[in-house]
Image (cartoon, rainbow, N blue to C red):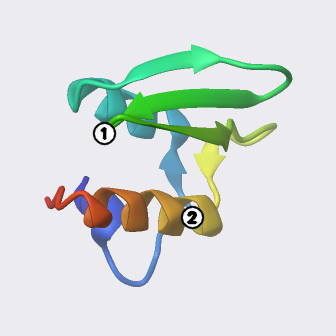
Amino acid sequence: MERIFARPTSGTIPWSDIESLFVSLGADVSERAGSRVAVVLFGEVKVFHRPHPSPDTDKGAVNSIREWLDLHEVKP
């Protein structure tokens, strides 16, 4: 979580770490078509794209995840 909230935004966070964080927060994570992943958390459904071929999440997705967690007052 600290890497998600770090500045400048990291582009080297493995998606598997982010997915594990969602699960630890109580999310239901499920596969969708293609590289899409649905995350049900905070009574909301967010769809993210699993990165490929690199396992690292891009900065735009990290920013989006940070904003979503921040909106729900989840902090490191």
Say what amino acid the circle numbered 1 marks.
Phe
Which residue of the protein is positioned furthest toward the right in this rendering?
34
> Which residue corresponds to the image point at 81% horizontal and 37% vertical from the top-left?
53
Which residue is identified by label 2? 11
In the picture of the structure, the residue carrying the numbered disc 1 is 42
Q: Residue 43 at x, y = what percent?
A: 35, 34
- Outermost residue on the front side: it is 43
Q: Which of pointers 2 and 1 lies earlier in the amino acid sequence?
A: 2
| Residue at the image position 17 percent from the left and 61 percent from the top | 73
Q: Quadrant of the C terminus?
A: bottom left
Disc assigned to residue 34? none
* Above or below, 16 relative to 57: above
Q: In the image, residue 38 lies at what x, y percent?
A: 59, 28
Nearer to us: label 2 or label 1: 1
Image coordinates of residue 44 in percent, x first then y, are: 44, 38
Q: How many marks?
A: 2
Residue found at x 24% / y 57%: 72
The secondary element bearing badge 2 is classed as: loop
Determine whether the residue tagged by mark 1 lies in a helix, strand or loop: loop
Determine the CA span between mark 2 and mark 1: 25 Å
Foreground residue among 61 and 74: 74
Q: Residues within 10 Å of mark 1 (few under 14, many from 20)?
A: few
Report the side of 76 relative to 38 (left or right).
Answer: left
Residue at position x 28%, y 66% in the image = 70
